[in-house]
Image (cartoon, rainbow, N blue to C red):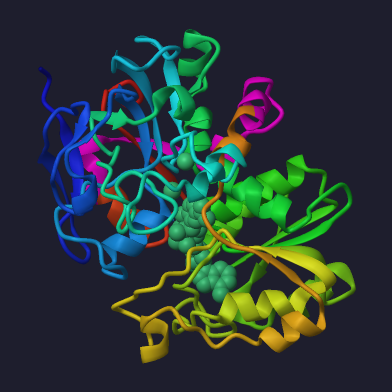
Amino acid sequence: MPGNHAVAYKGPGTVEIVQIDYPSFELRDGPGVNPANVGRKLPHGAIVKTLATNICGSDQHMVRGRTTAPVGLVLGHEITGEVVEVGPDVEFVAVGDIVSVPFNISCGRCRHCKAGKTGLCLNVNPDRPGSAYGYVDMGGWVGGQAEYVLVPYADWNALIFPDHDQALEKILDLAMLSDIFPTGFHGAVSAGVTVGSTVYIAGAGPVGLAAAASAQLLGAAVVIVGDLNQDRLAQARSFGCATVDVGAGRVEDQLEQLLGVPEVDAAVDAVGFEARSHGGGAQAAEAPAAVLNSLMNVTEAGGAIGIPGLYVTGDPGAVDDAAKVGALSLSLGTGWAKSLSFTTGQCPVMKYNRPLMQAILHERVQIARAVNATAIALSDAPRGYAEFDAGAATKYVLDPSGLLTD
Ligand SMILES: NC(=O)c1ccc[n+]([C@@H]2O[C@H](COP(=O)([O-])OP(=O)(O)OC[C@H]3O[C@@H](n4cnc5c(N)ncnc54)[C@H](O)[C@@H]3O)[C@@H](O)[C@H]2O)c1
Ligand SMILES: [Zn+2]
Ligand SMILES: [Zn+2]
């Protein structure tokens, strides 16, 4: 049986490569595993040899010590790989298939899954609806920043790429289907982006850049991306976005200079609860409601705000006691007066991953280029985490099998 090296959270600011068990068709106890999930039988699962597994801003929230993630948690929810073994209840996924794995784990059998709400599956997380690999409070499914990972309900969850060789050729683009491309697309769709829209996207991290590429794909007239990180703003400009430096002042003033009006048709929050205040330069203080309040100001009355950016119910490092339990100071009166709509929560990846795969395979979009996807060895994960945390304009793709970096 092969060994299984993986990336584990070892306390604020630290990740390490550890040796974990090769997956089995049963969920065993371990750091973060919900007691009610221990011993759960997984005959419907497939073991995937990981070919690409990306570091995400969602991982950073945990690694910065901004969640209640336990030390030892095996990280990783953005998984692309080759099926090497299937459980006795798997009918259609086969050994040798190259697959994208949605970061949401879902059963395909509950009423939410049947309604397409795979980010809210009722059967995978004993604590609350919704689950993911390698994530705090998500049931305790072992993370995929590892050489091998168990994918439950494989027939339902795995998106099989149609051609093996083509999949390997485009693997850096296809690796974005497990999370950020569908997530960015969902942000844009839920903000109502359509042909001719003017769009403001807060955040030029990988999710914001994926939302920007998605808005372009949806036919937006102009896509404006805001951040206080100059390298990331330059990355947004590299594929045709306009940019706003939120460190330099109010977003509405800068939008007015670009558009002639201080408002947009649609807005996306690709930042989340670790937002920085506006006008405070590159080192601005944290202000968790800054983006939400700003988006309510800049979205045209009757418009919609897509909120893929993560907000939590427990943040030990929050700026004040209210924010420690996820209570933010929102100007909801502004949102109400303008009849704005909000869409929050996990992206239901499965709703979008197949059509976005087709857009990649038929070269309608260059998502890896937009987010500057860069492969590094699994053993380099600590460096990848550190550089990403420092604001590199890079989407790091870990390469446990050596396919991408050798
Ligand atoms: N809903 C989902 O399903 C889902 C999926 C993936 C990621 N996420 C979340 O999306 C968010 C973005 O992910 P990412 O990987 O791009 O993270 P990231 O941390 O790399 O990017 C966030 C960016 O926001 C910028 N920022 C901070 N304050 C700002 C402000 N006031 N205005 C504009 N930009 C500001 C930061 O400088 C940074 O570049 C995270 O909260 C992540 O957890 C959600
Ligand atoms: Zn992610
Ligand atoms: Zn379900």
Residue closer to the observer: 373 or 142: 142
Picture coordinates of residue 12 (x, y %)?
21, 66
* Quadrant in the picture for the C terminus: top left
Residue range corresponding to the magenta coloring:
355-382
- For the point 83% across and 77% down, which residue is it? 262
- For the point 53% across and 82% down, which residue is it? 277
Tell how many labels. Answer: 0
Determine whether 51 is above or below 6 in the image: above
Picture coordinates of residue 125 (x, y %)?
35, 50
* Quadrant in the picture for the N terminus: top left
Determine whether 204 is above or below 18 in the image: below
- For the point 41% across and 88% down, which residue is it? 322
Left or right placement of residue 30 versus residue 185 in this view: left
Picture coordinates of residue 183 (x, y %)?
57, 48
Residue 267 visible from this viewpoint: yes
Which quadrant of the figure has residue 82? Answer: top left
Picture coordinates of residue 98 (x, y %)?
43, 17
Residue 367 is covered by the magenta coloring: yes
